């Protein structure tokens, strides 16, 4: 049974005198930095001089270079994209880490695949919100908090678990629950979840769009029915609050019957085998190697796939629907 930690099990006083450096002031970095500051922690921001630097200054943080932030801090949050984190870590963070510093990552990717090597004299912890950055901030402000996965990869100080719990409290996660996990589990769940959601949200709906148009429906009605109305948002919200199966009760019995009898025709053993192969690619590192090669080649495949997607007839219909609805 998974272990969940809440407010009473986390003690902010353990880290109240430490300096927390947030490296990367993007969506997650900004939200987590603001939340920790509002929780009473001393937070500085490490950044390059770009829009994120300006935004951090506007938010009234002390902003310094990444290397200076790593040197000044006792707790270092690395909230950078997976593909650039190793180079920046090796160049600007690793040389400035001190004994018993705490290195915090929100993604298990670079640890699990061995792209990031951490010195033995620091604590290594995982604090991974299961929510987009904006919601991490909005939920904190509302008093609710976003759930996070937490884990300890390296416990040099002997207090890594207590420290990551305190940090989870600092960003607001223990209000709803900090769930015990690991760098390996976070990587598998995150990558697989992203890929499955992409398959179901983007590609399955694009196929459904083509079938509806073939059947004589207007492209605009097809787009509206499949996602542009926002019904899926409400359905997923109901699933998150009531349960994946329980939300079916919110649909008509005609809808229930159609979903329950036709759904298994799509979610069959063949699809399960495809999903299993996707997980194997994640577990063996095949996907990570493929993505690394793609970056080294200038992301040519990614660019081609973007171009193909944006030139699909669905996009023109989508734009017309948004214009008609007054959303664009």
Image (cartoon, rainbow, N blue to C red):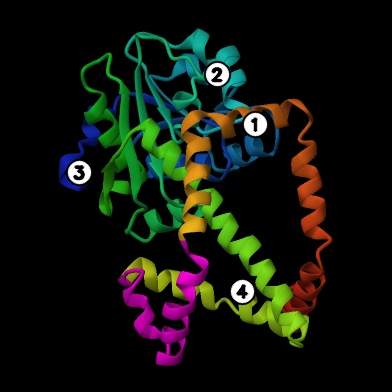
Asked if one can make out residue 133 in the rendered structure from this viewpoint, the answer is no
For the residues marked 3 and 1, what is the alpha-carbon distance in whole angstroms? 34 Å
| Secondary element type, mark 4 | helix
Q: Reading the chain from its start, which is encountered first: label 1 or label 4?
A: 4
- Residue 89, numbered circle: 2
Q: Horizontal and vertical percent for residue 83?
A: 62, 30
Q: Which residue is mark 1?
A: 290
Crowding at mark 2 (Cα within 10 Å: few <14, some 14-19, many 20+): many
Q: Residue at x 53, y 50 (%)?
A: 274
Q: Which residue is mark 3?
A: 3
Q: Reading the chain from its start, which is encountered first: label 3 or label 1?
A: 3
Q: Reading the chain from its start, which is encountered first: label 2 or label 4?
A: 2
For the residues marked 3 and 4, what is the alpha-carbon distance in whole angstroms? 36 Å
The residue furthest left is: 8
| Secondary element type, mark 2 | helix
Q: Reading the chain from its start, which is encountered first: label 3 or label 2?
A: 3
Q: Reading the chain from its start, which is encountered first: label 2 or label 1?
A: 2
Q: Nearer the viewer, residue 327 or 183?
A: 183
Q: Which residue is mark 4?
A: 227
For the residues marked 3 and 2, what is the alpha-carbon distance in whole angstroms? 31 Å
Q: Quadrant of residue 100?
A: top left
Q: Horizontal and vertical percent for residue 258?
A: 47, 84
Mark 1–mark 4 CB contact (< 8 Å): no
């Amino acid at each position: 049974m998974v272990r969940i930690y809440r407010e009473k099990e986390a003690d902010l006083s353990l880290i109240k005198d430490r300096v927390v450096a947030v490296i990367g002031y993007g969506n997650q970095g900004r939200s987590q930095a603001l939340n920790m500051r509002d929780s009473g922690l001393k937070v500085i921001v490490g950044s390059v001089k770009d829009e994120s630097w300006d935004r951090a200054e506007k938010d009234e943080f002390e902003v310094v270079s990444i290397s200076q932030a790593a040197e000044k801090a006792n707790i270092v949050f690395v909230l950078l994209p997976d593909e650039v984190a190793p180079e920046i870590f090796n160049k600007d963070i690793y040389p400035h880490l001190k004994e018993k510093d705490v290195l915090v990552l929100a993604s298990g990717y670079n640890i699990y695949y061995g792209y990031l090597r951490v010195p033995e004299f620091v604590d290594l912890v995982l604090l991974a919100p299961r929510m987009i950055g904006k919601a991490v901030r909005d939920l904190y402000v509302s008093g609710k908090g976003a759930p996070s996965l937490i884990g300890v990869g390296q416990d040099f100080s002997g207090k890594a678990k207590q420290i990551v719990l305190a940090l989870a409290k600092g960003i607001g996660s223990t209000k709803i629950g900090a769930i015990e996990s690991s760098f390996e589990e976070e990587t598998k769940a995150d990558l697989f979840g992203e890929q499955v959601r992409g398959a179901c949200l983007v590609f399955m709906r694009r196929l459904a769009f083509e079938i509806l148009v073939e059947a004589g429906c207007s492209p605009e009605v097809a787009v509206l029915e499949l996602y542009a109305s926002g019904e899926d948002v409400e359905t997923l919200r109901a699933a998150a609050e009531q349960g994946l199966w329980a939300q079916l009760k919110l649909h008509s019995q005609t809808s229930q019957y159609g979903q329950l009898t036709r759904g298994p025709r799509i979610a069959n053993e063949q699809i399960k085998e495809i999903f299993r192969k996707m997980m194997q690619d994640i577990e063996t590192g095949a996907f990570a190697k493929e993505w690394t090669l793609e970056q080294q080649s200038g992301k040519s495949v990614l660019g081609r796939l973007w171009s193909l997607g944006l030139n699909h007839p669905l996009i023109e219909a989508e734009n017309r629907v948004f214009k008609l609805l007054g959303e664009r």
